[in-house]
Image: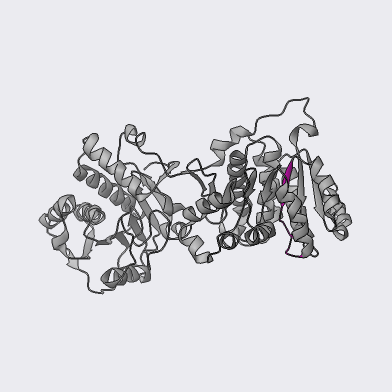
Amino acid sequence: MSSIPYNLYRASEVRELDRLVINEFSIPGATLMARAGTAAYDVIRLRWPDARRICVVCGVGNNGGDGYVVARLALEAGYDVTVYQLGDSKNLKGDARSAVRELEAKGLKPVSFSHQLFAGFDVIVDAIFGTGADREVSGEWLAAIDAINHAASPVLAVDIPSGLHADSGRILGAAVRADMTITFIGIKQGMLTGHGLDYCGELLFNDLQVPSGVYERVKPSAKRIVYEELKHCLQPRARTAHKGQFGHVLVIGGDHGMSGAVRMAGEAALRSGAGLVSIATRASHAAVISAARPELMVHGVETVAALQRIIAKASVLVVGPGLGGSDWAQTILSPVIESSKSMVVDADALNLLAGNPATGCAWILTPHPGEAARLLNIEVAEIQSDRFHAARKIQHDYGGVCVLKGAGTLIDNGVDPVGLCDAGNPGMASGGMGDVLSGVIAGLLSQGLNLTAAARLGVCVHALAGDRAAYAGERGIIATDLYAHIHRLVNPD
């Protein structure tokens, strides 16, 4: 079993990898199927060593063929094996047909599925649909998926949970909720964002011994981004360094009752290494924030003229944390949007931007799905049904870099393959996490990283800090728990 690779692919790109392997690198499809089935069988043997009764649910395509190989190997090893066939077995062809014949030659004939309950099995293997599934699940297929999901047994999905869209992570009406998924040749991008993370369970990868030259022929649609691959951007500082070399971040926001948001963003920028951090907020908040965190330079701002004077001294802007939607917020936002300085646009600033769209080349937009829906004037469900499309559309319409937050955060600059961060955890679903992320990204921008590098590294640092904060448990993490971990992560060994 291999570690999870960085390159991610759409279903069509994985099919092209398959084609190259078979046609140009002369590895027969039957060999790939045998390797896939063997890899899946090995997972059962190693992860559930006490299992004796195995149920394999097969479709009529190559994914079903992988399942037949699993069943044959388990049968040969002495397991009690039941195989359910979905779809007309007459539609089996090619390598899958050969695989079922080999199984039948061992004395096991698949049973046609007719709404049986999957009870009493130690492991259920899902080999119904492969990466080509793109229609809503119905009929016996839906019944089988429901039966699998209602069974008490652990589930191993072969290549991809049936009913999960490989490109988007969308659920096609229903999908198998696997405890573990073993996928082959290329990671499908939809497995690592949106619903894909919940339905795949623990994800394993096997390249089926595909030659490395195959991967040089197909450009990935997305790439996993990880802290270990990006931390080189954080070089040691010279002994003669001074604060003026590491930028001046200005955080703008904090309408009445929301001073905490700007304070958290500001402190996150400091913890990320910004040389100076200022806050522009309501005048009534200035003394409170200064007393709580004296390293922040806090300005009460009630007029555009006052804000413009502070903007002139800053090198990087953050606008949106606690900004609200009042007349003050709208007035304050205008000179920020008109500025040519690098900036992070978050939270309420995104909501205001949605009502008065503009484009920029020097900003990073950091919407969560609700804010993304407002930016695109669609429903949240549409965002979540294809997060890759949503991130690309926001970047196209508004410019700069889009960071679409959520499980499997996406970073799209409109040029490179989309970056996907699969670190982070559900404990980070609490107030203030987005404010901290904005501050981290701005702090990195202020130290000279470009928009894409700051967005990617910032997302990874934030997510990994959240994972470290969750060592004692996910539930109950608060945003400020991340500060100490951020401090450590921006000082790599």
Which residue is at 39% across, 56% downward? 180
Quarter holding the C terminus is top right
Q: Is residue 325 above or below residue 461?
A: below
Q: Position of residue 349 (x, y in %)?
A: 69, 57
Q: Position of residue 389 (x, y in %)?
A: 47, 54
- Magenta region: which residues? 316-326
Question: Is residue 444 shown left or right of residue 31?
Answer: right
Which residue is at 85% across, 51% downward? 305
> Is residue 184 in sight in this rendering?
no
Which residue is at 14% across, 51% downward? 98
Image quadrant where residue 456 sits: top right
Question: Is residue 472 shown left or right of residue 165?
Answer: right
> Is residue 345 in sight in this rendering?
yes
Q: For residue 244: magenta?
A: no
Question: Is residue 441 shown left or right of residue 159?
Answer: right
Magenta portion: prevailing SS class? loop
Quarter holding the N terminus is top left
Q: For residue 325: magenta?
A: yes
Q: Is residue 353 above or below residue 268?
A: below
Question: Is residue 376 shown left or right of residue 256?
Answer: left
Nearest the viewer among 343 and 101 is 343
Image quadrant where residue 148 sits: bottom left
Which residue is at 77% across, 46% downward? 250
Image quadrant where residue 109 sits: bottom left
